[in-house]
Image (tube, helix red, strand yellow):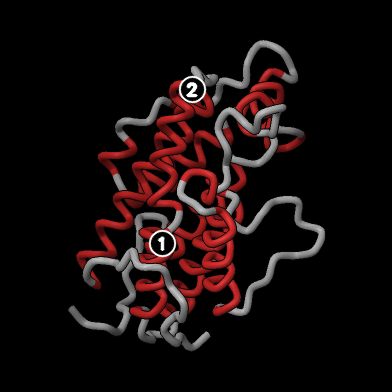
């Protein structure tokens, strides 16, 4: 394998890394609270079409399993999906039915958040003070993968070495969302969720696992030992 990126493109003309970046961003948005434009895009099948288009560029077998009607199902009432989001993911008297924070599923949570922050800080990223979610929340972790794949795409466009960004994706997926999203999905399934969240979690789990397999073929298996220092990456 050559370590310098070649000008590979998907059927859209984007590089595969650029498509992955868009897909991670789309998944992150999909796990946000379903109001306004997001809710409109779910009901109008805009979100489903976007997910399918991006998945189709990267993983045709996974695309063929997508339950498209489920991804358009926001319920009968205007607030059905928002009520369901609150039931499943927001804290109740004894905590959420199914937390969207990695440290809840694979803790201790403080240690998990500290390690996630090491990844973010290493790439010059910080959690904005006004941000409501914790660093190990699914939207924050998916936005970080969006950032890493975007960085890989930018390097690829310049014909530069992308291996460090790919290894960072591999290590982060293995240690964080790839480790806990399957547990979250199993717990979610037991809570009999609305079809939208059931299918969204299933798709994300499958995509993360296929991405981890791909990256481990390229760069070897990721270590699951706690990370104190992250290998240097030029950003």
| Label 2 sits on residue | 70
In this picture, residue 77 sits left or right of residue 63: right
Crowd tier of the residue under label 2, counting other residues whose Cα lies within 10 Å: few below 14, some 14–19, many 20 or above: some
Q: Please name whichever residue, 231 or 146, is drawn nearer the observer in this view of the structure.
A: 231
Circle 1 packing at 10 Å, graded few (<14), some (14-19), many (20+), is: few
Residue 126 in percent (x, y) is at 68, 71
Q: At which x and y percent is residue 4?
A: 30, 84
Q: Are marks 2 and 1 in contact (CB under 8 Å)?
A: no
Cα separation between marks 2 and 1 = 29 Å
Q: Which mark is residue 13?
A: 1
Task: Write the residue at 70% across / 28% down.
Answer: 92
Residue depicted at x 54% and y 45%: 104
Residue found at the far top of this picture: 76
To which quarter of the image does residue 114 belong? bottom right
Mark drawn on residue 154 = none
From the viewer's perspective, is 216 left or right of 120?
left
Which is more foreground, mark 2 or mark 1? 2
């Amino acid at each position: 394998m050559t370590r310098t990126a070649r000008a590979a493109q998907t059927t859209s003309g984007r590089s595969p890394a650029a498509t992955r970046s868009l897909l991670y961003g789309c998944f992150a948005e999909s796990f946000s609270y379903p109001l306004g434009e997001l809710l409109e895009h779910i009901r109008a099948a805009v979100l489903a079409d976007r997910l399918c288009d991006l998945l189709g560029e990267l993983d045709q077998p996974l695309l063929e399993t997508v339950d498209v009607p489920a991804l358009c199902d926001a319920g009968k009432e205007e607030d059905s999906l928002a009520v369901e989001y609150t039931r499943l993911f927001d804290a109740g008297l004894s905590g959420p039915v199914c937390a969207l924070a990695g440290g809840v599923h694979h803790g201790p949570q403080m240690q998990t958040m500290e390690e996630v922050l090491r990844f973010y800080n290493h790439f010059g990223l910080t959690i904005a003070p006004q941000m409501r979610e914790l660093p190990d929340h699914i939207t924050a972790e998916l936005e970080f993968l969006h950032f890493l794949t975007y960085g890989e795409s930018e390097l690829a466009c310049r014909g530069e070495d992308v291996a460090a960004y790919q290894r960072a994706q591999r290590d982060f997926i293995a240690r964080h969302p790839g480790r806990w999203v399957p547990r979250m999905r199993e717990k979610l399934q037991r809570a009999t969720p609305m079809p939208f969240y059931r299918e969204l979690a299933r798709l994300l789990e499958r995509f993360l696992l296929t991405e981890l397999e791909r990256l481990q073929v390229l760069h070897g298996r990721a270590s699951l030992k706690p990370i104190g220092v992250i290998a240097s990456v030029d950003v």
